[in-house]
Image (cartoon, rainbow, N blue to C red):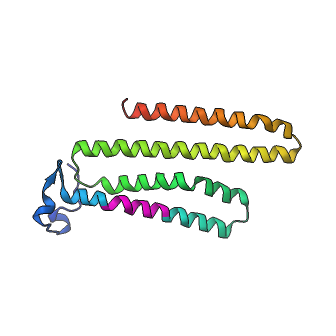
Amino acid sequence: MKWNAFDAGVAGLVLPSWLEMNFAGSPVWAWLGLLVALPLVVVVARFAGGVACSMVQRRTEQSRVKKLVLTARKPAQIGIATALFHLVRSPLPLAPALGGFLHYCELAIGTIACLWLIVRFIAWGSGHVARALDRSGRSHAKAVIPLLQKVLQSAVVLFGVVFLLQNLGI
């Protein structure tokens, strides 16, 4: 049995009877908790991304680090929000079907965020390699970089889709 943080014996809370009613196998207060948690974790993740970007922009002179953080910001925010949502919803007494559905949603969103992050890193890295080749005087070798970038991104997306479908049981 899951530990219930809102159990009257643990927290000393007495909830109104309408909050303890079940809706689709879960108490109403758990549904309300999900509704409050979703925008809250999004705001926290966006705040964390903004703080990271402002810290890097203030304290770093190197443009590579700034570009790397800016490249990773949006996918990382989605990953952070997904992880926080999982942490918030885990102690809630949800119906097994709803818990399983939310687990698969978290898995899908987390996988998509990781894929997006890897694809953005590939694009960032290929731009960095192209600039390094220009500086070294081998700009003719730069012509193959877009092809390698597309091949790597396609492979990452293909493996990611296979991973996602396999974990979703499709």
Q: Nearer the viewer, residue 2 or 129?
A: 129
Q: Which residue is rendered at x = 19% and y = 64% of the image?
A: 10
Location of residue 142 by image quarter:
top right
**Residue 151 painted magenta:** no
Q: How many marks?
A: 0
Residue 31 percent coordinates (x, y): 24, 56
For the stretch drawn in magenta, the main secondary structure is helix
Q: Is residue 113 above or below residue 56?
A: above
Q: Which residue is rendered at x = 54% and y = 65% of the image?
A: 50
In this picture, residue 95 sits left or right of residue 53? left
Q: Which residue is rendered at x = 52% and y = 53% of the image?
A: 76
Q: Which residue is rendered at x = 50% and y = 47% of the image?
A: 113
Residue 30 percent coordinates (x, y): 23, 57
In this picture, residue 169 sits left or right of residue 145? left
Instruction: Give the residue furthest to the left.
Output: 17
Q: Is residue 37 above or below residue 129?
A: below
In the picture, which quadrant includes the C terminus? top left
**Residue 37 painted magenta:** yes
Residue 90 percent coordinates (x, y): 30, 52
Residue 104 percent coordinates (x, y): 35, 41
- Residue span colored magenta: 36-46
Location of residue 147 by image quarter:
top right
